[in-house]
Amino acid sequence: MSTISKDPSATESPGSTVESDVDTGRLDGASRARIFTVLAVIVLFTEVAPMQYTIVAAALQKIAPTFPSVGANINWAIIVFGLIGAAASPLIGKMSDVWGKKRMFLVCGVLFMIGCVLCAVTDSWAIFLIGRGLQATAIATAVIAYGLIRDLMPRKYVPLGLGVTATGLGFSAIGGPLLGGYLVDNYSWRAIFWVLAGFTLLMLPLVWMVVPESKLRVKERIDVLGALLLSAGAGLTLIYLDKGQDWGWSKPLTLAWLFGGIALLVLFVVVELNVARPIMDMKLLFHPRVTLVLGGALFASFLIGVQSYALGYMTQSPDSDTVVAGVQQATLAQIQQQTGQPMPAAAVQVALDPGYSYGNGFTLLEFAIRIALLQAVLAMICGAAAGVLARKIGARIPLVFALALFAGAGVCYAVLPHTWVVFLWVSAAFGIGFGFYYASMPILMVEAVPQEQQGISLGMLGVMQSMGVAVGLAIVTAYLNASPITAQVSVAGQPPQGSVIPQVFADHGYEMGFWFAAAAALVALIIAVVMRHGRTPATGGTAY
């Protein structure tokens, strides 16, 4: 049986190598069929999180009309998912260490299912966000899955298992875009959440019957205060980033949100350094191996958030000629209703200020087939490939390659024409990077920490990735709110009157979001280049 770290110093010094004989329930004597069946069920269950993200992010343009008053803040359907997921991941990761990984796996599934039902039945924006918050616990299923794989898989299969878990078996990659597109185009966006709830309901008994429970337990109390401080501090900071443009970045009441968030995050660190059983081991968090991985995850995830939202929204928006024609027809209809007399179309002149270059009027299914599907399939394939490569050459080189593609994709999105063909090929390159990135990160984290800290350390990774997505979306939302498009309407030669076009934004807003995300990806790339960790073949955690 493989040995793991049990020396107390291992939790304080990730670089130490000590051995023990703790039994985690590893399937060393099991058949390959048994091993890969367990892996397949774990991965299928975790695919609900990326599947919903793929579908919901792409469907926001279709969901927005149900909540017409929220404007660009429709992005909070994704931001709140990342925010709550960031707060919940370390807490649930710690719970999985204490109470059992399989048990928390199932709890997350039940909470996700309840959230789906809430979103499917409500017309209230507030209740919809509550439902999204409950669904965010699905983010933690990946955190738990990484721990289950490290505990249960034979060591030689751990890097491959982590890579496959990170990018899936194809259900979310291939089925997600096509299923989401079909449901929205033929039924409504609510059908997405009913189907996700049904999928989870089918998977819960399968997980219960097939996946064994890890025997590893850590006897600690749960630090609820730490989780509350982390989530509150992150939430206030994100609200400032999202609403600063509307409220005035430098106004005292606006800055109060930022300063309050920073103060709570500082207090979180102080509390964690002084409590007996912190939700995050600060000594572990600030070790170079862990800090660099988490920093890279934070900055790299900005582009993941921006890209997933922007491409779906831009291609599903109508083109400028369609918008102009729609405004003209609405104006003519209004004049006829007021005067009782029709007016020639030529008497109504409409100009957009500023104009915009994107917009294909795709249905969600068209977007899935033309753009999202290729990206998702490449990500799935490259995730498994990165797991194999990590076992041979280490996870750092695949990560460097991924982040170089991220930075290049961000620049291309910003400077190239906003056509769906450009989006197709740039997103394909991004998909390759996405697969390598999502496989490399958990492997690097598993290799960096002792087994007793795996749940919380992978929870930290979930925090940074979720926060990165949320921050990226908050920033692009601020840019879009600052880049409205106004229809200047002139009737029978009269001076034009302006009105803001809802749900359509100027190119500048998207371009600034892409530039911001590309710069963040470049920072992540620099971190990966200087990183000393991950330069030797991955061991599946045998160093601990």
Image: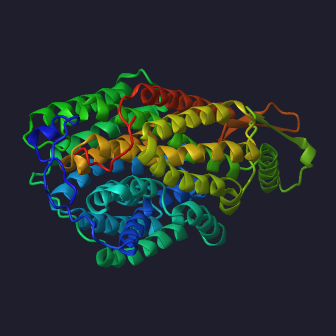
How far from the left and from the top, in percent, is residue 326?
78, 51
Q: Residue at x 25, y 53 (%)?
A: 93
- Residue 289 left/right relative to 161: left
From the image, which quarter does the N terminus lie in? bottom left
Q: Which residue is drawn at 49% across and 48% down?
A: 386
Q: Nearer the viewer, residue 171 or 538?
A: 538
How far from the left and from the top, in percent, is residue 339?
82, 52
User: In which quarter of the view is residue 279 placed?
Assistant: top left
Q: How many marks?
A: 0
How far from the left and from the top, in percent, is residue 133?
36, 55
- Residue 324 left/right relative to 94: right
User: In which quarter of the view is residue 262 placed?
Assistant: top left
How far from the left and from the top, in percent, is residue 203?
39, 74
Q: Nearer the viewer, residue 544 or 67?
A: 544
- Residue 149 left/right relative to 5: right
Can residue 67 be seen here? The reply is no
Q: Which residue is drawn at 47% across and 51% down?
A: 388
From the image, which quarter does the C terminus lie in? top left
Q: Which of 445 and 340 is in front in this view?
A: 445
| Vertical position of residue 484 compared to residue 88: above or below | above
- Residue 400 left/right relative to 130: right
Q: Residue furthest left?
A: 276
Q: Which residue is drawn at 35% across and 27% down?
A: 253
Can residue 15 be seen here? The reply is yes
User: In which quarter of the view is residue 30 placed?
Assistant: bottom left
What colour scheme does the image use? rainbow
| Vertical position of residue 284 compared to residue 176: above or below | above
